[in-house]
């Protein structure tokens, strides 16, 4: 059986790009199984995702030839083996709904991940991690130890060769330096009330204001707090009869589902960053 790959690329738009990519793969015995493309007329950029089977070349040779092919088009590209799950590290604080959901989906075969470690600034979920046989790293964070804690976090992420870091309700602001180091490979989740209802107990604030919609946003982490490129969002309608507890429970469910979809699409290489936005080939 031929190995299957996913090729993602972006470049300045021009005539014949789909033909050129298809021809490149055909000449090397590649059989396209799935393809999608998008032309952004505002930026003049072209985006493409192609899943194909190819047994004629080794992955190393394929990458070398892709590099030569892509250069004249000024392409940014990535080649990924479908059979290789994405290495991931999860980070969490005291709220475990997103962590629990991701672990269950992973063990159920619903996410193309290889979860290598869980990092937390609290000890609450070490038993949950143990039940999934995932190493748990307890790294307390204070104002005085933040720099050392982040250095250790990054050390773990790099040691595990993580391609993805998920902030599954990790309630610490990452430094600008760590955000830059994790650019394009760290996903955060938060309620969609922002910039309203900041700080503690947002659902209490929302209930007090009588909101009619609650929701969640999953986005890439950047130095601009909670303003990175958005991957997925969803909302749930509520009314006056809902209690604070109802809103909190519904909000947690929405956060879990939104984060799971964002992680799934990222792990399947369906998300391409387009400046401060994303292109998602579902």
Image (cartoon, grey):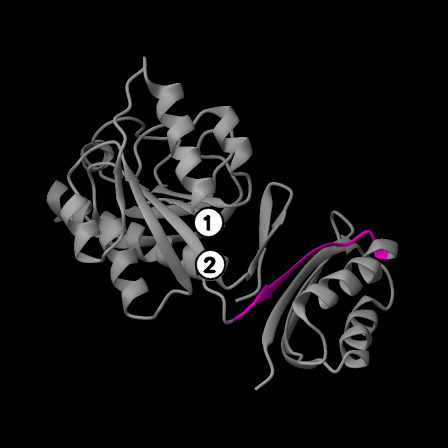
Residue 142 within the segment the image draws in magenta: no
- Mark positioned earlier in the residue sequence (1 or 2): 2
- Considering only vertical position in the picture, is 166 above or below 176? below
Foreground of the two, 27 or 59: 59
Picture quarter with the N terminus: bottom right
Direction bottom: furthest residue: 1
Question: Could you tell me if residue 243 is visible in this image?
Answer: no
What span is colored magenta in the figure? 73-82
Foreground of the two, 39 or 5: 5
Residue 60: x and y, percent?
69, 64
Helix, strand or loop at disc 1? strand
Label 2, on which residue? 86
Residue occupying image coordinates x 40% and y 31%: 195
Question: How many residues crowd around disc 1 within 10 Å: few (fewer than 14), some, or many (20 or more)?
Answer: many
Residue occupying image coordinates x 60% and y 83%: 2
Label 1, on which residue? 164
- Magenta highlight: main SS: strand
Question: Could you tell me if residue 122 is visible in this image?
Answer: yes
Helix, strand or loop at disc 2? strand
Direction top: furthest residue: 144
Asked if labels 2 and 1 touch by Cβ distance under 8 angstroms, the answer is yes
The disc at residue 178 is none
- Mark 1 and mark 2: Cα distance apart in space: 7 Å
Please give left or right for residue 125 compared with residue 182 in the image. Answer: left
- Considering only vertical position in the picture, is 232 above or below 33? above
Residue 17: x and y, percent?
81, 66
Residue 56: x and y, percent?
72, 80
Residue 177: x and y, percent?
52, 25
């Amino acid at each position: 059986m031929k190995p299957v790959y996913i090729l993602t690329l972006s470049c300045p738009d021009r005539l014949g790009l789909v033909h050129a990519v298809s021809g490149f793969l055909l000449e090397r015995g590649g059989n396209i199984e799935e393809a999608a493309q998008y032309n952004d007329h505002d930026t003049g950029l072209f985006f493409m995702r192609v899943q194909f089977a190819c047994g004629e070349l080794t992955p190393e040779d394929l990458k070398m030839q892709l590099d030569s092919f892509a250069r004249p088009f000024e392409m940014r590209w990535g080649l990924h083996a479908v059979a290789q799950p994405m290495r991931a590290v999860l980070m969490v604080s005291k709220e475990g709904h997103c962590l629990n959901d991701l672990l269950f989906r992973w063990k159920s075969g619903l996410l193309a991940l290889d979860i290598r470690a869980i990092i937390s600034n609290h000890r609450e979920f070490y038993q949950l991690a143990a039940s999934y046989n995932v190493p748990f790293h307890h790294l307390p964070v204070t104002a005085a130890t933040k720099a050392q804690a982040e250095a250790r976090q990054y050390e773990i992420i790099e040691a595990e060769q993580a391609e993805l870091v998920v902030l599954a309700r990790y309630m610490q602001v990452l430094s600008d330096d760590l955000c830059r180091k994790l650019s394009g490979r760290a996903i955060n989740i938060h309620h969609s009330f922002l910039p309203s209802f900041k700080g503690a107990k947002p659902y209490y604030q929302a209930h007090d204001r009588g909101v009619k919609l609650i929701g969640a946003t999953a986005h890439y982490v950047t130095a601009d707090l909670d303003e990175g490129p958005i991957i997925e969002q969803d909302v749930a309608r509520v009314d006056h009869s809902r209690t604070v507890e109802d809103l909190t429970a519904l909000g947690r469910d929405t956060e879990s589902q939104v984060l799971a979809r964002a992680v799934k699409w990222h792990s399947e290489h369906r998300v391409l960053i387009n400046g401060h936005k994303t292109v998602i080939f579902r």
